[in-house]
Image (tube, rainbow, N blue to C red):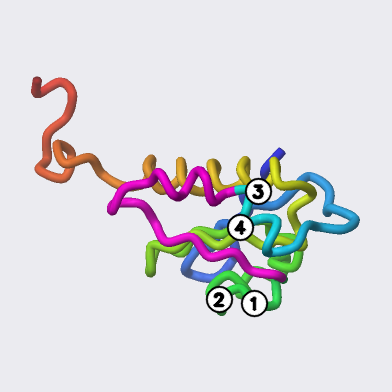
Amino acid sequence: MLVDKKAAPAEAVKLSRPAEVAPRGISAAQAKKAIGTVTAKWGSEAPAVVVLESHADLPARAKSDPEHVSAEGFYDDSTGTVYLVANNLSSPQRALQVLSHEAVGILVSKPSPATARGRTCADD
């Protein structure tokens, strides 16, 4: 189960967190291997994906949330980058789930070409 939590500062930061912190996560190499087959098929519009060994390597924006230590993933909309935190992921399968969660969040938050032009489904 993922929990999105907003930080109190002016700019909200959303981190993907497990319901319970994994007692021992996976390595960055394991996470990269798990997601590699998926991200290799992504096109040029895909976000950059960075696998970090530890929460300590998260960008400063993510660290503005005091609970970043338990983050499994983070999408930085200012850079278009998805971050996965390997030692907070319980398994390679969990790495794929968190990647999917972050990537879907990006797709949902981006306007489609039609809505970017001010059109809605009702206009069609």
Label 2, label 3: how many angstroms apart (C-alpha)? Answer: 19 Å
Report the residue marked by disc 3: 95
The residue indicated by pointer 1 is: 57
Identify the residue at horizontal 41%, vertical 48% (top origin).
106
State the SS at label 2.
loop
Q: Nearer the viewer, mark 3 or mark 1?
A: 3
Q: Tell me the magenta residue range.
A: 35-53
Going by the numbered disc 3, the residue's amino acid type is Ala
- Tell me the residue that label 4 is attached to: 32
Q: Is residue 52 magenta?
A: yes
Whether the residues at callouts 2 and 4 have beta carbons within 8 Å, the answer is no
Q: Which quarter of the picture shows residue 114?
A: top left
Closest to the camera, between mark 2 and mark 4, is 4
> Alpha carbon of mark 2 to alpha carbon of mark 4: how far?
19 Å
User: Which residue lies at the image location 61% right of the left edge and 73% below the top edge?
Assistant: 58
Q: Amino acid at mark 4?
A: Lys
- Mark 4: give few (<14), some (14-19) or many (20+) Cα within 10 Å: many
Which mark, residue 26? none
Whichever of labels 2 and 4 marks the residue nearer the N terminus, that label is 4
**Label located before the other in sequence (3 or 1):** 1
Q: Type of residue at label 1?
A: Asp
| SS at mark 4 in the image | helix
Q: Earlier in the sequence, mark 4 or mark 1?
A: 4
Distance Cα–Cα, label 4 vs label 3: 9 Å
**Crowding at label 2, few (<14), some or many (≥20) Cα neighbours within 10 Å?**
few
Q: Secondary structure at mark 3?
A: helix
First reached walking from the N terminus: tag 2 or tag 3: 2
According to the picture, the residue beneath numbered tag 2 turns out to be 59
Amino acid beneath label 2: Pro
Q: Is residue 74 found inside the magenta-colored segment of the image?
A: no
Q: Position of residue 20 (x, y in %)?
A: 83, 48
Among the 4 quarters of the image, the one containing residue 26: bottom right
